[in-house]
Structure formats: C-alpha cells, structure tokens
Image (spheres, coloured by chain):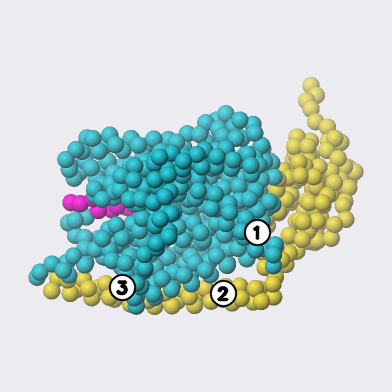
C-alpha cells in the first residue's frame, strides 16, 4: 500500500517530465532551425558576427588603434554595447565614460590615462559637452571609418595638468 | 571545409592533451585506478588535467615566462609520459589498453535507447550550437572570454589593460587561452566546443555515480536525462562560455566522491581525487571556495551526527580535501596580493534584511519555475519524502546538508548584495539560475537516492 502511492507519485512526475521534455524540444526548435539554415548557407562562425555593423566597425578600428593603446569609449553602460566593443578590441585598454561627461573630467582622463583615441558609439548622437570642448581645443582629429560610431585620434600631450600654487 | 575540420582536430587535440595529463597523474596517484569506471576516469582525468595545466600557466606568468603552446604543454607532458613508464603507470596503461581491445557489449533495451537517444540529440545539438556561433553571452564576452583573449594576446596573465572583476579566479580564461594556443589563433566559436564536452563529462560522471548508488542502468540513464533535460538552464550552459558548468562539474566530483567515502563505497584513493576536485572548485570561480567549504562542513556534520566507528580518524582524513581547497585557492590569492590586484568587496557590503524576504520568494519561485530546472527540484522533494528517516540516519544526510546548506547560502548571498531596491529583482533574475546550477547535479544525486529507496521499498515484502 505504502509503495503504491509512492509509485503513483513517481509515475505522475515522470509523465509531467515527459511533457516537459516535449516542451523543451519545442522551445529549442527555433534555434535548431537556425542552425540548419546557417549550415545550409555556410554562414557560420565569424560570418555570423559580421552581420553586426558594430563588429564590422570594431574590426576596422583594429587597423587604426594599436594593440597597446588606450581609448576612451563614450557610451552608456546600460546599452550593453560597450562590453561588446571592449571584447572586440581587446587587448587594447578600454575606458568607459558617459557621453555627457563634462570637459574637465574628459581632459583629465586624456592626460592621466594617455588615451590615444576617443570613440563614440552612436554616430547619429551629437557629441556631448566634453567631446565638443575637446574638438574645439584642436586636440581631436576625426578618423574617417564608416560605421555606426565615430572615432577621433587624440593628442593627449596637449592636455597639460598640474598644481599651480 | 578543410580549415574548420583542421581547427576541430586541433581543438580535440588540445582537449585530449588535458585528459592525457590527468590520466598519467591519476595512474600513479591512485592505488588502483582501474577500480574507477571508464567514464569516471575520463571525467576525473580531464578535470585533473585542467587544474594542473591552468595552475602551471599561472606559475609561468609568476616566473615571468611568456605563454606559448610548447612552453605550456612540454614541461607537463614529458613528466606525465615518464609517469606512465613507472611500474604502476605501466600496469595501469596495459590494463586499460587490454580493456579497450575487448570492450563489453552494452545490451541496451527499450527505455535505455530512449534516454540515450534523448541525451545524444541534446549533446550533438549543443555541440553544433556551441561551435557554429561566436561567443555572445554577457559574462562570456564581459569576463571569461575577454580575459582569455587578453591572456592569449599578451602571452600571460596580464590584467593591466582590463577591468573585469580582476580578482575572479582564472581557471576558465587560462584554459580558453590554452585552447587558442592549440588553435593557433583566437577562434571564439570553435573554442566553445569545450562546454558541451565538459557537459558530457559531467553527465557521464553523474551516470557513473548513479550506478555506484546501485541504480540499474535504465534508472541511471533516466536520472542523467532527468538532469540534462529539465528546464533550459543546463541546456543553455552547454553552449555559452560561462564558468558555472565547470564549477558544477567540480562540485559533482567533490561531493559525489565524498558521499561514496562516507558511505564506505568509495574506491581506494577517492579522497586524493576529492582534493583535486576541491582545487578545481576553488580555482574555477569566486563562488568555488564557499562551495568547497560547504562540502567539508557537510561532511564534518554528517560524521559527527552519525557517529560511525572511527569518526575521529575520518574527520582527520578530511584534511586531504582541505589541502585541495587550499591548493586551488592560495596560488591565485598570493599572485593577486603580489600584483596588487584588489580583491572585490562588491559582493559583500552590509546586511539587508528586506532583501532576505524578497530572496526567499524568488528562490521558492525559481525552484518550481519550469523554465529554470523543470521538475528537478520537485523531484528532490519527492526523493526526500521517499528517503524518510534515512535522510538523517545514513550518509544521505551529507547530500541533504550540502544541498540545503547551499540553498541557505544563496539566500545569505542575496541578503548581503549591495543593490538598490529597484535593481534587486533584476540582479536576482540575472544570477539565481546560475547559483542553483552549481549544485543541481548534486540535487540529481539525491533524486537517485530517492529512486533507490523507492526500488528497495518495492522489493521489501509487505
């Protein structure tokens, strides 16, 4: 009698699990379909990444930014794109700053971190106050690389810093 | 066509070298290696090889030697090959070769085929998903994969150009960078083949441990399928480059062997292997040392509670797994201290009781949420009911203490997490499934014990 209810409970659990397995395969079916389609077309691996304009732009940036250089990336962390660019451009040193960063902080970062490039993820957004001031100072030189973002070469030596008392 | 096939071969060669390193060490470190089942030895050899190789890579950086494939592999492979020429190594090798020449027949039937078929479809699909798509998941590109790329490019453990939880242990990034050396370049889709392979070894280990619990082949295969095909979390971790699946592997190895040792069913040398799995736990992820500590704590409590003969001697024997924990924890801690890598306190700031209340409800929901782990946790509850008083009068207590203790540890972790009120729900959503994944294979072992109890109650005369 005792083992009857145990067996019954086990059978019910196994039956629901069986339905759950069917749901799981249904859930994964769209991914399986995508794998099959891509295998058929042969666009797998790196080709998938090239579908992303941000990656293509980052790949072009690697020809301009030396591997040991530091760059400042203007973007909001919440957008989730900064992490991707950092990964694509690794091992280049990456510093994230908000697009609205004021000039003194941005100038200090250029000087202190000896940044050689300034990147803005979204080309359509106007430069923030810091980037505008840096452009006016003549220390930024735009580099023409087509893509979703902008890149400027930075002459960090023009941002002098020190205590004057 | 030739290039991807050649890349795949190089990847498999790199993984094979890890198995070889572990195999050679275990051939001499274990008194009777052939007491372990083939799947167990494959899994433990791989795990041991990974721990050995990545700690060696850390040592190379410490000595200021840049990483290269020859520099990483040769100083380990040559002594490993020499170990196989020792009398014990030769004996083990010849025994294994003889067993390979005369493999036993499987005689699968009905349900066996179904379970094995489901597992095969899942693992083949996961392997394709892993190697055909580039690295994309958040932690993979933010932490593990990014560090691996940096380590490969800088030929060492250089963290000066990256700020990505730099105090996290580096078993996985170093392993990925070793595979990049094997592949000859950064190939972040092929390298993800590591994860379905690791998942297969984890499932093989679970199957073998289930067989040691006296489950029939059908029951053990069913249990393995029950873990793998329950919810989407385990499946997803088979193809994203996260450290949680490796951590779950080491946790299963350490806990499974300790359970067998407590139940007097462990093959000779199990505690040595447990020590190596504990080292893997501590060196794999930030959550590893606490997990390893709960293994020891649960074992101590079980021995004390059960008061079986020789309790003091057995308590003293636990110093071996403790040594493993220290072996996995200390080198990285010392390296970090020497290189002024600040150990983050971003996880522990204060105590927020209101978060505890919220975390309890989130945890309860996650345990029954089909998308996470399907029916695994309801299965654990059923197993606990079937085990009845055996749960606290037998070594099953160890598994229950480990699982229960870690559920409490998850709650404690959320109570200490410094997040804003608005951020807390999304913080839990982003982490809870992974924290639970670390010990779901052990929860599956509890389900296995429940199955065994059910079988025993059926065979007992009424």
Cβ–Cβ under 8 Å for marks 3 and 2: no
The residue segment tinted magenta is B393-403
**Element class at badge 2:** helix
The residue identified by callout 3 is: A13
The residue identified by callout 2 is: A32
> Residue at image x 58%, y 54%?
B13
> Residue at image x 33%, y 65%?
B220
Q: Kindly identify which numbered label has been placed on residue B7.
A: 1
Q: Are marks 3 and 1 on the same chain?
A: no
Above or below residue B376? Residue B265 is above
Q: Residues within 10 Å of mark 3 (few under 14, many from 20)?
A: some
Residue B237 locus on image (x, y percent): 50, 60
Q: Residues within 10 Å of mark 1 (few under 14, many from 20)?
A: some
Examine the structure image and report whether residue B394 is included in the region drawn in magenta.
yes
Q: Are marks 1 and 2 on the same chain?
A: no
Residue B384 visible in rendering = yes
Residue A165 locus on image (x, y percent): 79, 21
> Residue at image x 57%, y 73%?
A31
Most foreground residue, B100 or B200: B100
**Element class at badge 1:** helix
Classify residue B30 as left or right of residue A111: left
Q: CA distance from mark 3 to mark 2?
A: 27 Å
Chain B appears what colour?
Answer: cyan
Closer to the chain start, of discs 3 and 2, is 3
Give the chain letter for yellow. A
Mark toward the viewer: 3 or 2: 2
Q: Chain of mark 1?
A: B
Q: Chain of mark 2?
A: A
Q: Main secondary structure of the magenta part?
A: helix
Mark toward the viewer: 3 or 1: 1
């Amino acid at each position: 009698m005792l083992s009857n209810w145990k067996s019954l409970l086990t059978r019910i659990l196994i039956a629901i699990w069986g339905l759950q397995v069917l749901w799981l395969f249904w859930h994964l079916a769209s991914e399986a379909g995508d794998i099959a389609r891509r295998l058929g077309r042969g666009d797998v691996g790196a080709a998938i990444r090239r579908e992303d304009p941000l990656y293509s732009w980052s790949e072009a940036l690697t020809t301009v930014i030396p591997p040991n250089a530091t760059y400042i990336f203007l973007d909001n962390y919440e957008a989730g794109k900064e992490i991707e660019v950092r990964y694509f451009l690794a091992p280049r040193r990456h510093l994230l700053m908000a697009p609205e960063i004021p000039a003194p902080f941005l100038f200090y970062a250029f000087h202190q971190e000896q940044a050689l490039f300034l990147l803005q993820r979204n080309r359509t957004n106007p430069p923030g106050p810091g980037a505008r001031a840096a452009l006016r100072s003549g220390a930024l030189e735009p580099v023409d690389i087509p893509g979703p973002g902008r890149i400027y070469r930075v002459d960090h030596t023009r941002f002098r810093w020190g205590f004057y008392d | 066509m030739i290039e991807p096939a050649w890349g795949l071969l190089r990847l498999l060669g790199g993984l094979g070298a890890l198995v070889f390193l572990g195999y050679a060490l275990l051939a001499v470190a274990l008194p009777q290696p052939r007491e372990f089942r083939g799947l167990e030895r494959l899994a433990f050899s791989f795990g041991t090889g990974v721990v050995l190789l990545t700690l060696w890579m850390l040592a190379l950086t410490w000595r200021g030697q840049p990483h290269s494939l020859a520099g990483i592999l040769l100083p380990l492979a040559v002594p490993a090959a020499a170990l196989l020429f020792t009398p014990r190594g030769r004996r083990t090798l010849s025994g294994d070769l003889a067993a390979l020449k005369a493999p036993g027949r499987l005689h699968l039937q009905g349900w066996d085929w179904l379970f094995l078929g489901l597992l095969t479809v899942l693992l083949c699909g996961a392997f394709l998903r892993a190697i055909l798509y580039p690295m994309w998941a958040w932690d993979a590109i933010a932490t593990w994969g990014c560090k691996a790329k940096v380590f490969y490019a800088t030929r060492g453990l250089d963290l000066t150009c990256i700020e990505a939880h730099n105090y996290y242990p580096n078993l996985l990034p170093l392993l990925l960078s070793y595979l990049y050396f094997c592949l000859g370049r950064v190939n972040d889709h092929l390298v993800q083949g590591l994860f379905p392979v690791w998942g297969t070894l984890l499932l093989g280990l679970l199957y073998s441990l289930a067989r040691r619990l006296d489950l029939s082949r059908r029951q053990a295969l069913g249990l393995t399928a029950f873990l793998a095909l329950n919810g989407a979390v385990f499946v997803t971790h088979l193809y994203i480059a996260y450290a949680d699946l490796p951590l779950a592997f080491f946790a299963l190895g350490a806990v499974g062997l300790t359970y067998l040792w407590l139940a007097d069913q462990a093959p000779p040398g199990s505690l040595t292997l447990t020590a190596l799995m504990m080292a893997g736990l501590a060196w794999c992820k930030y959550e590893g040392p606490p997990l390893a500590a709960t293994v020891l704590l649960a074992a101590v409590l079980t021995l004390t509670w059960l008061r079986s003969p020789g309790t003091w001697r057995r308590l003293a024997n636990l110093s071996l797994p403790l040594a493993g924990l220290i072996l996995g924890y200390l080198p990285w801690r010392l390296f970090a201290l020497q290189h002024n890598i600040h150990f983050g306190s971003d996880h522990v700031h204060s105590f927020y009781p209101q978060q505890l209340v919220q975390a309890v409800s989130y945890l309860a929901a996650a345990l029954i949420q089909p998308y996470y782990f399907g029916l695994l946790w309801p299965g654990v509850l059923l197993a606990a009911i079937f085990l009845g008083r055996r749960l606290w009068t037998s070594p099953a207590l160890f598994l229950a203490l480990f699982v229960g203790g870690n559920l409490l540890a998850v709650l404690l972790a959320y109570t200490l997490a410094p997040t804003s009120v608005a951020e807390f729900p999304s913080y839990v959503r982003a982490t809870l499934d992974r924290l639970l994944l670390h010990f779901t294979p052990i929860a599956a072992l509890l389900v296995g014990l429940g199955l065994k109890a059910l079988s025993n109650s059926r065979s007992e005369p009424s």
